[in-house]
Image (cartoon, rainbow, N blue to C red):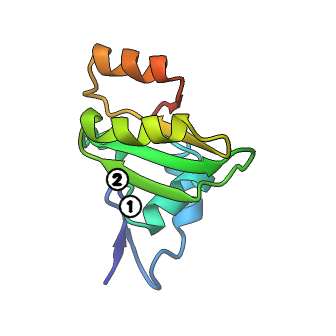
């Protein structure tokens, strides 16, 4: 089965994701650096940020680490809040969140009040 770019629906010919790194860096690095996008693409949790699919993207890191140890999505802000509260108490982990384009001003305000790092698509 051919692999398809989650941003532009380019179909990769040949063996799986061969060529995704060059393609991503040339076409989509402005959306998210390849090094951050690839784990999401590989885990099939990257659903096309430029398409504004309405999901919240969460990345969990050990403090001081540059690579996420867990990446997942949640459909709503109310589903994100328990994760934020849990990690806020942690001294060894940090959470980075990317809000969907449809996030309300109130949701973004609450996110800021929690002090969670926010990535922009």
Report x, y in % for residue 95: 54, 41
Task: Identify the residue at image location x=47%, y=41%.
Answer: 86
Element assignment for label 1? loop
- 100 relative position to 42: left or right: left
Can you identify the residue that label 2 sits on?
8
Task: Identify the residue at image location x=41%, y=42%.
Answer: 83
Report x, y in % for residue 82: 36, 40
> Does the rendering let one see residue 26?
yes
Q: Quadrant of residue 58?
A: top left
Q: Quadrant of residue 76?
A: top left
Foreground: 84 or 11? 84
The reply to whether dot 2 and dot 1 touch (C-beta < 8 Å) is yes
Relative height, residue 95 to residue 19 (above, below):
above
Image quarter of the N terminus = bottom left
Relative height, residue 11 to residue 114 (above, below):
below
Can you identify the residue that label 1 sits on?
5
- 65 relative position to 94: left or right: right
Q: Quadrant of residue 101?
A: top left
Image quarter of the C terminus = top left
Report the Cα–Cα distance between label 2 and label 1: 6 Å
Report x, y in % for residue 49: 36, 43
Q: Residues within 10 Å of mark 1 (few under 14, many from 20)?
A: some
């Amino acid at each position: 089965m051919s692999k398809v770019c989650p941003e532009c629906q380019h179909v990769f010919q040949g063996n799986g994701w061969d060529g995704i790194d060059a393609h991503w860096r040339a076409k989509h690095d402005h959306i998210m650096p390849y090094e951050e996008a690839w784990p999401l693409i590989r885990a099939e949790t990257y659903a096309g940020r430029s398409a504004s699919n309405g999901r919240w993207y969460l990345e969990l890191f050990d403090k001081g680490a540059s690579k996420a140890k867990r990446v997942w999505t949640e459909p709503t802000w109310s589903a994100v809040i328990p994760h934020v509260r849990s990690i806020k108490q942690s001294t060894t982990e940090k959470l980075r969140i990317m809000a969907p384009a449809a996030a309300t001003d109130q949701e973004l305000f609450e996110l800021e009040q929690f002090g969670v790092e926010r990535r922009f698509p």
